[in-house]
Image (tube, rainbow, N blue to C red):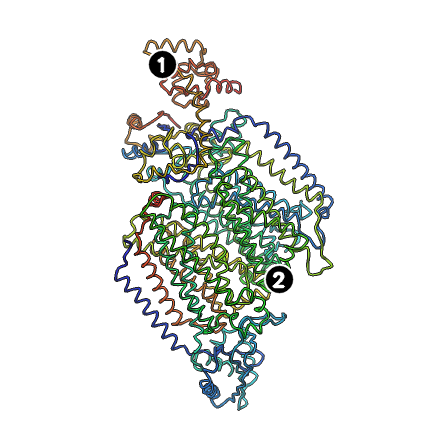
Amino acid sequence: MGFQISDKAKKVFFGLIGVGLVLLVAGLFTQTKFLFPHLDEDHPNDLEVVSYAEDLDDYSEDLVALKEEVKNALGDGYIITISEGEHGHEAHKGGEHVEEGHEAKPSTHHGPRLLWNIHISKTSGASHDESAHDAGAHSEHGNSNIKHGHHDASPAALLAGMFESGTLALPDHGFRRFWSNLLINGFFFMGIALGAMFYIALHYATESGWGVVLLRIFESVAGAIPFGMVLLLIVFIAATLGFNSIYPWMDKDIVAHDALIQGKTGYLNPTFFWIRIACYFSLFFIFINWLKKTSKREDAEGGVDLHYKMYRKSAFFIVGFAVFSSTMSWDIIMSIDTHWFSTLFGWYTFSGMWLTGMITIMMVTIYLKSKGAVEFVNENHIHDVAKWVFALSFLWSYLWFSQFMLIWYSNIPEEVTYFEYRFDSYKYVFFTMFVVNFILPMVLFMSRDTKRSWPYLITISLIIFVGHWFDVFCMVMPGTLFEEWEFGMLEIGMFMASLGGFVLLIFNGLSKAPLIQKNHPFLEESKHHEF
Amino acid sequence: MHKESDIRIPLILGDKSYRDITDDIIRPIESKAPKGWYILISIAGIFALWGVGCIVYLLGTGIGAWGLNKTVEWAWDITNFVWWVGIGHAGTLISAVLLLFRQKWRMAINRAAEAMTIFAVMMAGMFPLIHMGRLWVGYWVFPLPNQYGSMWVNFNSPLLWDVFAISTYFSVGLVFWYIGLIPDFATIRDRVTKPVAKKAYSILSFGWTGGAKAWNRFEVVSLVLAGLATPLVFSVHSIVSFDFATSVIPGWHTTIFPPYFVAGAVFSGFAMVQTLMLILRKAFKLEAYLHVKHVEYMNIVIMATGSIVGVAYITELFISWYSGVEYEAYAFLNRATGPYWWAYASMMTCNVLSPQLMWVKKLRTSLTFTFILAIIVNIGMWFERFVIIVTSIHRDYLPSAWSYFHPTWVDIGIYAGTIGIFTVLYLLFARYFPTMPIAELKTILKSSGQNFKEGFGNGAGYWEKHAHHGHDEHQAEIITEKPKTVEANIEEVVVEENLVEENTTEDQPDKLVFTKEEAEVAKNSLLERLGVGSADNKDDLKVINGVGPVLESKLNDMGIFTYLQVSKMTIEDYNVLDALTGSFPGRAERDDWAGQASKLNENK
Amino acid sequence: MADKVIYAMYDDDDTTKDAAQHFVDKGVHVSEVYSPFPIHGIDPIIGVEQSRLGIVAFMFGLTGLAVAMIGIRYMNIIDWPMNIGGKPNFDFFHNMPSFVPVMFEFTVLIAAHGMAFTYLLRNKTLPGMPARNPDPRTTDDRFVIELRLEDNHNFSVDDLLSMAKQTNIVELEEKTIK
C-alpha cells in the first residue's frame, strides 16, 4: 500500500508528543503568575493590581494569604494599604487603549474580576519627590521599563516587579492560558490542512499538471484536518458550556452591559455559531474524504470520468471555501476581539493557512524523497513547491501590510485599538513575527539555487513555519490574555504535542494509499516535469 | 520537450508549420489593410478629436466645466481613471502571472493584451493630469529640485504613491512588451521587401540576431521581468485603492480594498481582452491560434475574479453592519437604497450575477455570449468605481450639503474621447505590430499544435519518434472523448488549409531530370529567356524570400545575377532551375520569386 | 584576421539539437546557433551558461531601494518635515508605512529598467544596430549552426563540411569573414 513510516521515526514523533505533554502539564502546574500590576504615572505611590480570574470564589483563601504577603513585601519602611475596587469594574487597560481626546468606549473584554488599589506610604521621611520623579519617567515609556527599572525604582515599581516576577502570585485555576493555547494550535493545524485542501481543489480546478505526483501527499496533509477540528471543538464546547470565556459574546453578563456586542448578537450567538461551525467542518471533512475515495477509485478504474468529476467538484468546493474561509476566521478568531472588525481579516488569515500548508507539504515531500519512497518526484517538483512558499509569503506580507497600513494610516479609534494593543504589549513578538515571515523568504528564497537546496529549504521553512504559529499567537492572545501574556513551557509543550500528533496523522494518511495516482490523466506530464 | 497529456486540447489548430505561423501572424502587416480598418480608425479618430477638443475646452475654461460640485469633488474623472487603470491590468497579468504559472494559452493573447495595457494606462494617466487644471505643470508631481527651496512632494500622500505606481507600471509594462517584440520585429525585418518598412522594422528590431546566447538571456529577462511585474500589478491597483481606503470616509475606508481592487482590475481587464481579441481573431483570421478553448479559459478567469469581487462586496456589506459603526452602515444602506440605487443595482447585476452564468459550459464556450458578457462586465466595472466614488461622498455629514452629480457634455466628451484615442492606438498596433508573439508560438507548436498532438500533416509520426515514454493503455479511449466544442472550429480551419494545399499541388509538374549535356542546353536556353547579367551589376538575391546564400551562389554560377532576370522567370523556368540546382521542387513558385524580384527591381 | 566560417542550415529545432550534439560529440566547438525561437535544451549541449541577468536585476533593485529611502528621508524628514495626520514626521522609521509604496515602486522601476538596459547592451541590440544573422530565414523557420574555424583549430574546413553533411542539413555554406 502506501508509505509505512519507520519505527524510528514513529518513536521520534511519539517522543515529541510525550515531551510536549510533560512540558504542558509542568507548565500548567508551575504557572503561578496571575496578578498583574499597573503603575500609574500620576501617582507614583499607588499601584493597581488586576486579575482576570474566572471565578474568584475559588481563590478566597489564597487571596487572604496573599494580602498579608503583599503588606509585608517591602519590609518595615513602608505602610501598605489595600483597598478593593468594585467587582466588574470597567478597566481602561483591560481591553483597549482609548486614544486621548476620544470618548472612552466600553471595553472589548470583560473588565478584571479583581481590582486592588494599593497605596504605599513611607514611615520615615525619605526622598519622596525623587522617587516620584523616577516613577513618572519610567512609566512614560510603557511597560518594558518596569522590568529593568528595579534598581532605583519607586516602591510601587518595586512591588510591581514582585508581581511581575511571580514572587507575589496566585495559582491559576482558570486555565485561560491553556484554552487560548488550545485555540491557537487547533486553528493553526486545521489551517495547514485547509491550505493543503484548498490547493488540491485549485490543482484540479485549474487542470494543472505539474503536481500530480504530489497529490497523494496533498491529500494526506489535507486529510489530517480532523486533528485541528477536534482541538477546536473542545474549545468551542468548553466555551459554550462556560468552562472558558474566550468568546466574550458567549457570556450573557458581558453582553448585557455592552451595547456594541448587543448589536452583533444577530450573528454572534451560540446557536448560529454552532450552525456555521457545523457547516464549515462538515464541508471540509466530507470534501476531503470524498476526494480521497474518488482518487483511489480512479486508481482502480482508470478513465477520465472520475477526473472530470473531481475537476467539477473542486471548482464548487473553491466557491464554498471562498465564502467559508472568510466567515470562519471571523467566527473563530476575529470575534475574540468582539468590538474590532476588518474586512480583510478573512483573506489575510487564509493566506497564512495556505502558506503553512505548502510548507508542510514541502517538508513531507522532502522527507519521503530522502527515504526513497517517491522516486517519481524530481527536484523540479520541490522547486515548484518552494516557489509557492516564496509567492505565498509575499501574498501574506502584502495582505498583512494592507490591513496594517490602512488602519494605521486612518487612525480611527474603533479600528486602531487592535494594533495599539499589539504594539504596546506584544511589540517584540508582533514585529519579529512580521519581519521573519516577510524578510526571510523574500530575500533567501529569491534565488533559484536556494530553492533547490534541501538543507536551506528545510531550515528557512521551519523558521517561517514557527513564525506563522506566532502569527496566530498574535491574533489570539491579545484578545484572551490581554497584556498579561506569557510564553513558556505551556506554549512550547502544547505546540510540540500538537505537531507530533498532526504529523503522525499525516503519515497515517500516507500509509493508506499508494503514493502515486497511477491513472491520473496528467501523470506523464507531471513525471517529466521540468522547466 | 515532453509530450503533454492527450486530454489537453490543442492550442494551435490545423496543420501548421513554423513558416505558417510567421505567415499567419504577419499577414495583416504585409497585406493591405481591409476597408473596415479604415472605417473604424476614422470613427475612432473623430471620437479622439472630439475628446481632445473637450480637454482643450476644459483646460481653457477650468475644472468647473465638469459636473463636479462642492460635495461631489470626484466623479467621472476619477471613475474613468480607475476604470482605465483596471483595464490596464490584464495585460501584465496575462504575460507575467501566466508566464510564471507556465500557462501556454497565454501566448494567444499576451501581446495584444500588453498593448491594451499600455494604451489603457496612458488613458488613465490623462485624467489626473487634466484634473490638475494646469496640464503644463504636470511634472510637478515628481520630486524635482525647484526654485521654491524645500518644496518637495509629499511622500505620505496616496496620490503621490499613485504617481510612482502608475508611471512605474507604465514604463515597466512598456519594457516588458518591447523586449518580447524585438525578435518578432526581426522576423518582419527579414521578410518585408519595401525599403521604408524594411528600414523601419530594422530600427525597431534593434539588430536582433537570434543567437543561442541571446535567446538564453531573453528567457531569463522575460522570467525576471515577469517576477517583477507580478507584485507590481498587485501594488498598482492596491495603491489606487489606497487613494480611497486611507481616508476616513465611510464606504471608502475598508481594509479589503487592496486585494479586492486587484481582483476587480483583473476582472475588467480580461473582459476588455475578450472584447478586443474576439474582434481581432476574426478580422485577422487568427482563429487557429485563438479558439474556443482560449476564450473558455479567459471566461473562467472572469468568472473566478467576478466571484472574488462578489465575495468582497458581500463582505463589505456584512461588516458595515457587523462593525456597529452607524456611519459605515448608512454608507452602504445609502448605496443600495439611496438616490444612486440604480448604479448599485447595475454594478451588482453586471459584476456579480452575470459572470455566474459562465458556470454553464454552453455559455462560456459561446463566442457571441462571451462578447456580450465582456461588454456587460466592462459596463459593470465602470459602475463599480462610480458607486464607490460618488455614492460614498454625495451625502456627507451635513444633510444641507447633500448633493447629486450630473455629468456635463465635457465629462461625457472626455470619456468618449479616451475610448476613441485608445481605439486609434489599438488599431495602429494591430496593423503594424505582430499581434501575437511569433517566436513564442513556435515554441509550443510541437507540444500543443493539433497536427503534432494528433499526428497528421507536419506533425505526422513526430511523437512516435520523440516520445521518451510509452503511451498509456487508456490513451485511445481518451482521444475519443475529446470535447466537442473545438471540433467545429478545427474543421473550419482544416478546410482552409486544404484549399491552400490544393492550389500549390495542382499545377506542380513532375520533377525534371537532366543529363549533363541536357543541363548545359537547358541552362543556355534559360539564360536566353532571362537575359544575361554580370557579376558587376549584381543584386542581393538573398533578399528574395526562399533564396539563401547557397542558392544565390548557384544562381550566380549559372549567370543569374539580377532581380530583372529573376523577375522574368515562369513556372517552366522554375522547374528547369530546380533540376539544375537540385533544390526543392515547388519552392520558387510557392515563394513567387518572380513577383518578389520584379517588386525589388522596381524599388531598386 | 580573416576567418573561415561554416553555416549548416536545418529546418527543424530537434534536428538542430541532434546536429549540435553530433558536432560536440566529435569535439567540434559550436560557435553559435541562430534560431527563430529559443530551442529548449540546446544550451547545455553547446556550452551556453545560464545568464546572470537575474543577479543584475537584484543589484539594481537594491540600488533603487537605497536611493528611494535616502531620497525620501532627505526630502520629507530632514529638509521639509510635515505633520501629516498627526503622525511623527521627524523620524523615518515611525513614518515608514506610508513610505513603503514609493520605496517598493522605485525598487521595481530601477530593477526592471536596469536589467532591461543591461540585457540590450549585452545582446548588442540597440536602435540602428545591423542584423548579424547569417541568413534572413533564421528568424522565420530555419536554424543555422555556425562553426568558426578559429574556434576549431584541430579541424580543417573539409573535415567540418563532411561532418556537417552527416547531419540532416538543408543547406551548407562556407564563408570568409573579416
| Mark 1 on the same chain as mark 2 | no
Quadrant assignment, res A456? bottom left
Taking the spot 44% from the left edge, 59% from the top edge, the residue there is A437
Taking the spot 64% from the left edge, 62% from the top edge, the residue there is B327
Residue A99 in the image: state x and y as whole percent.
60, 69
Subunit under mark 1: B
Quadrant assignment, res B546? top left
Q: Is residue B280 left or right of residue A205?
A: right
Question: What numbered label is drawn on residue A185?
Answer: none
Q: Is residue B129 left or right of residue A344?
A: right
In-front residue for pair C67/C44: C44
Callout 2 crowding tier (Cα within 10 Å): few <14, some 14–19, many ≥20: few
- Residue A169 to residue B96: above or below: below
Taking the spot 66% from the left edge, 34% from the top edge, the residue there is B46
Residue A518 in view of the camera: yes
- Residue C101 to residue B23: above or below: below
Number of labelled discs?
2
- Residue C115 to residue A117: above or below: above
The nearer-to-camera label among 1 and 2 is 1
Residue, disc 2 = C85
Subunit under mark 2: C
In-front residue for pair A185/A262: A262
Element carrying mark 1: loop
Q: Amino acid at mark 2?
A: Gly
Residue, disc 1 = B512
- The N terminus of chain C - image quarter: top left
Q: Is residue B348 left or right of residue B360?
A: right
Residue A217 in the image: state x and y as whole percent.
35, 54
